[in-house]
Image (cartoon, coloured by chain):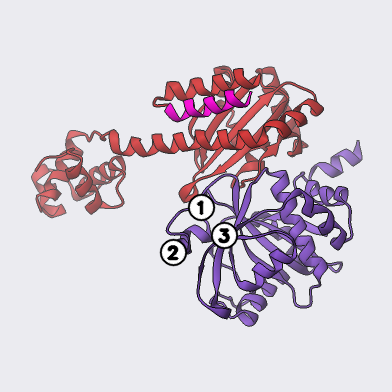
Chain colours: A purple, B red
């Protein structure tokens, strides 16, 4: 299932959290060769993980991480504005209606269903919180994934060649991308909405209601 | 309605005083037919800046009881950035229930929608709209105006940040004569021991004067405080 978890609530999902940060190390350091920091526990974490971001995570049936992405509002601190200003002609991408999406990660062996589920999660976030765009840093692989998912990334600046190529772009989930994405995940919209609602309603309320 | 919100946003951008900031919250109530609109900026030690239409009795009561420490709205929004419909919050504890009922007694509506705002350098604020209505009507309202409210919330926040910035530049902090004297001696190149001797006080006392001045000047350290005092004309050497 899809989980929407703030950084300060990750401790409620220790297995999911630990496998996510390990899978990130595997993807970004080992497979993509990015200059990311991996700590002694084998976790890839950066300064933005300390900014209480919102994670959208696909949880496998056994409770481990299947794939994830990380969201932060652009009115606060973001990777794009802090480190990639040279790709946007120094323009700060800053709006309450644009969130930054980074660290799009798939667990080794994750299938297309997981990619579709994460796309769906991004779409639900966009819909629920009335956003216009996501902004992100793309490598060519990500750009291909987004195009495959019908997200039409709008790359506004690029640098580097081949494997080193990187771009900053905006993307969004259009209403008509929901149906094919839901089909790929194999669920209906109400299930998807229920996952989102579950994440943003207090857990503490449940036992009280049950006892009444 | 849309054009009213547009011209409202323009009027918020024209705001220059705290009084106008306050009237803006009242104007928004009128435009959207709401009972309350509140903007407040919270830091780790409490409220720093706010405007809104809650009765002063409720604001006093809230401060007196230190409800900031248990208000489910604050808890549900602190350090987050996703807007919250009050219904989603955890009101299950006895204290939270009592707080909610008391709020209603003081004229707060039963429905609320709060937008947490994350600004530069860890700045954090909350923008709330509040009304008395059914769940269905409130959901409809949030669905219709949610996006506009996010924009309005951030315009309020921009203004607050502007006030904060101009505050630092415009209002020159006044140092007490002893603080000014201590800083002046340091600016003239005297050591702490020499300055203390000139002033006929102990070095320890001198340090207190300097620290007080540093705090007033909003400076990072003593050197910075001396520089700030000179550049703002607080002392003349």
Q: Please provide the residue range marked out in magenta.
A: B1-14
- Spatial CA span between label 2 and label 1: 12 Å
Which percent across, then down, holds residue B105?
Answer: 69, 18
Q: Pick whichever of labels 2 and 1 is earlier in the sequence.
A: 2
Secondary structure type for disc 3: helix
Q: Pick whichever of labels 1 and 3 is earlier in the sequence.
A: 3
Circle 3 sits on which residue?
A: A50
Q: Residues within 10 Å of mark 3 (few under 14, many from 20)?
A: few
Chain assignment, label 2: A
- Spatial CA span between label 1 and label 3: 21 Å
Circle 1 sits on which residue?
A: A93
The answer to which of B80 and A161 lies nearer the viewer is A161
Q: Is residue B6 magenta?
A: yes
Q: Are marks 2 and 3 on the same chain?
A: yes
Residue B215, above or below B149: below
Select label 2 or label 3 by which is in front: 2
Specify the quadrant of the image occupied by residue A18: bottom right
- Spatial CA span between label 2 and label 3: 24 Å
Q: Residues within 10 Å of mark 2 (few under 14, many from 20)?
A: some
Secondary structure type for disc 2: helix
Q: Quadrant of the C terminus of chain A?
A: top right
Residue B159, above or below B223: above
Specify the quadrant of the image occupied by residue B113: top right
Which percent across, then down, holds residue B174?
Answer: 24, 33
Secondary structure type for disc 1: loop
Label annotation for residue A86: 2
- For the point 52% across and 38% down, the residue is B42
């Amino acid at each position: 299932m899809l989980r929407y978890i703030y950084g300060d609530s990750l401790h409620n999902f220790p297995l999911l959290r630990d496998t996510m940060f390990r899978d990130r190390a595997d993807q970004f350091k080992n497979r993509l060769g990015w200059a990311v920091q991996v700590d002694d526990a084998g976790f890839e974490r950066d300064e933005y993980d300390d900014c209480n971001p919102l994670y959208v995570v696909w949880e496998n049936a056994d409770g481990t991480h299947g794939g994830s992405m990380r969201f932060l509002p652009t009115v606060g601190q973001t990777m794009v504005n802090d480190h990639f200003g040279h790709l946007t002609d120094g323009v700060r991408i800053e709006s309450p209606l644009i969130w930054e999406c980074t660290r799009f990660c798939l667990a080794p062996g994750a299938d297309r269903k997981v990619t579709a589920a994460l796309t769906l999660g991004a779409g639900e976030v966009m819909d629920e919180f009335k956003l216009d765009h996501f902004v992100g840093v793309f490598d060519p692989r990500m750009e291909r994934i987004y195009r495959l998912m019908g997200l039409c990334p709008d790359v506004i600046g690029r640098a580097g060649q081949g494997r080193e190529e990187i771009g900053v772009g905006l993307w969004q989930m259009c209403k008509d991308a929901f149906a094919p994405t839901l089909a790929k995940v194999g669920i209906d919209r109400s299930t998807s909405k229920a996952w989102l609602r579950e994440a943003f309603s207090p857990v503490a309320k449940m036992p009280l209601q049950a006892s009444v | 309605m849309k054009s009213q919100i547009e011209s409202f946003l323009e009027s918020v951008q024209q705001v220059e005083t705290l009084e106008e900031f306050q009237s803006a919250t009242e104007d928004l109530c009128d435009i959207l037919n709401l009972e309350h609109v509140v903007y407040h900026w919270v830091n780790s030690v409490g409220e720093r800046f706010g405007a809104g239409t809650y009765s002063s009795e409720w604001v006093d009561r809230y401060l007196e009881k230190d409800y900031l420490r248990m208000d489910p709205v604050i808890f549900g929004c602190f350090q987050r950035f996703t807007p919250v419909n009050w219904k989603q919050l955890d009101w299950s504890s006895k204290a939270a229930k009592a707080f909610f009922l008391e709020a209603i007694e003081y004229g707060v509506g039963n429905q609320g929608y709060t937008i947490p705002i994350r600004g530069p350098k860890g700045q954090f604020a909350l923008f709330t709209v509040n009304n008395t209505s059914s769940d269905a009507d409130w959901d409809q309202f949030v669905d219709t105006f949610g996006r506009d409210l996010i924009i309005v919330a951030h315009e309020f926040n921009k203004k607050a940040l502007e006030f904060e910035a101009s505050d630092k530049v415009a209002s020159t902090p006044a140092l007490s004569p002893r603080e000014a004297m201590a800083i002046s001696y340091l600016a003239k190149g005297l050591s702490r021991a020499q300055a203390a001797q000139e002033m006929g006080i102990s070095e320890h006392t001198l340090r207190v004067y300097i620290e007080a001045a540093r705090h007033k000047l909003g400076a990072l350290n003593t050197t910075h405080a001396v520089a700030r005092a000179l550049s703002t004309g607080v002392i003349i050497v």
